[in-house]
Amino acid sequence: MSKIINTVAAITLALSVGVVGANAKDYRGINERQKNQQERIAQGLKSGDLSNKEAVKLEKQQIQIAKTEKRMRADDGGLSLKERARLDNMQDHSSRQIHKQRND
């Protein structure tokens, strides 16, 4: 179980580190939210609220969000308001899924 958490967290961290750089101020809110989501998943797994399968699925959502952010930033290094709104919507959806899975 711990090996799964560490593997998924390492993949997600590697993806998110790739987008941090030019202007850390731009990244702070998005990265803090992503870190919070990952901590919620890890806590759910540790407490038994989430199964390994559920945790992996939720972590995959976080990986997808990180990939989307990286693609969005690839063109000019920043995020437009529309791109930021899309990432926020993706994180909102993920947050609801984490809550739902931890409380079912």
Image (tube, grey):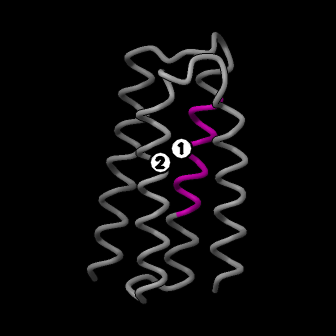
Locate residue 54 relative to residue 91 in the image: left or right: right
Name the foreground residue: 102 vs 42.
42
| Label 1 with label 2: CB-CB less than 8 Å | yes
* Residue 83 % position (x, y): 45, 23
31 in magenta? no
Question: Residue 15 got which mark?
Answer: none
Locate residue 86 relative to residue 70 in the image: left or right: left
Locate residue 85 relative to residue 31 in the image: left or right: left
Q: Secondary structure at mark 1?
A: helix
| Residue beneath the point at 54% across and 68% down | 57
Q: Amino acid at mark 1?
A: Ile
What residue is pinned by disc 2?
34
* Residue 43 % position (x, y): 43, 75
| Residue beneath the point at 42% across and 89% down | 48
Quarter occupied by the C terminus: bottom left
Locate residue 38 relative to residue 86 in the image: left or right: right
Q: Residue furthest bottom?
A: 48
* Residues rendered magenta in the picture: 59-70
| Residue beneath the point at 66% across and 13% down | 75
Q: Amino acid at mark 2?
A: Gln
Q: Quadrant of residue 22?
A: top right
**Comparing labels 1 and 2, the label whose residue is closer to the camera:** 2
